[in-house]
Image: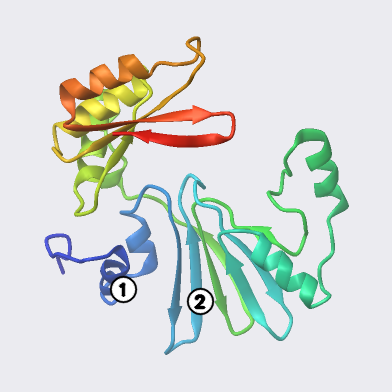
Amino acid sequence: VDLFNEYFPSDTLFISKFLSFYSLEELLSVSYGMFAISVYDKSTKKLEIARDLNGEKPLYYTEVENDGILFSSEMPPLIEYLKESGLFVLSKKDLKDILIFNSARSNSISDQVISLDPGTILTYSNGSCSIRHFHLSDSTKGSTDFSSTLVNVISEMTNTDTKIGVLLSGGIDSSCIAYVASSFREDIVAYTLSFDDSSYDESSRAIAFAKSLIQNSRKISAFPGGVATYYF
């Protein structure tokens, strides 16, 4: 079944249609970018949650006796539930890591709240969990040539019916992305952050570059209290 030539108003609708023909592994084998996904099969009462291959999107879970499994892309809801239930136990090891390294190696502050590893699928069924890895198919691994890879990725990312913005600093990376993206979309908006301190400010160069490529560019001024003013 070829679903890629059909129009879907949202990624959720596409995923639900895809999973009616294919498995979750097959979906994830052609998926890249930042995502966390959960799928519940009512007929089998099986829950599956998965995290993107590079771990860009956080995904946490905790197993609770008699309450099954809870999951979230943030820790606070899970910790709050455990606290309200009188079940929360602070991990002294993770707390020590945070105080010394400013982060916990387990990406959590409690042994009860677990960070799902990148590129894995957790299946919860009949009161037990199992975890397996998924991999990209050979057709999605891309070329080793940087230029063609950059153009192909940006082409796919801009092929959407939603609005697209580019964070343009004036540096090489963002300028390359803006240049390639503008060749695929004419409605791109470039956003540039400016500073009062001339030693940090690169907005004039970025705006000049944006105006040569992009019809709509916006400069945002940053003040000590945060982003305060838009200039259109």
Q: Residue at x 50, y 67 (%)?
A: 49
Q: Residue at x 46, y 48 (%)?
A: 53
Q: Nearer the viewer, mark 1 or mark 2?
A: 1
Snapshot quadrant of residue 81: bottom right
For residue 145, say whether it is visible: no
Looking at the picture, tell me which residue is in the foreground, 200 or 153: 200
Q: Position of residue 173 (x, y in %)?
A: 35, 23
**Residue type, numbered disc 1:** Ser
Label 1 sits on a secondary structure element that is helix
Disc on the earlier residue, 1 or 2: 1
The reply, left or right, for residue 4 in relation to residue 93 is left
**Residue type, numbered disc 2:** Leu
Residue matched to label 1: 16
Q: Position of residue 227 (x, y in %)?
A: 49, 36
**Vertical comparison of 110 with 141: above or below:** below
**Vertical comparison of 150 with 121: above or below:** above
Snapshot quadrant of residue 82: bottom right
Label 2 sits on a secondary structure element that is strand
Looking at the picture, tell me which residue is in the foreground, 22 or 211: 211
Instruction: Name the outermost residue toward the bottom.
Output: 43
Residue matched to label 2: 47
**Vertical comparison of 166 with 159: above or below:** above
Q: Position of residue 41 (x, y in %)?
A: 43, 82
Quadrant showing the C terminus: top left
**Vertical comparison of 93 with 220: above or below:** below
Q: Position of residue 156 (x, y in %)?
A: 22, 44
For residue 99, say whether it is visible: yes
Snapshot quadrant of residue 130: bottom right
* Distance (Cα) linking label 1 and label 2: 14 Å
Q: Residue at x 71, y 49 (%)?
A: 106
- Dot 2 surroundings within 10 Å: few (below 14), some, or many (20 or more)? some
The reply, left or right, for residue 187 in relation to residue 153 is left
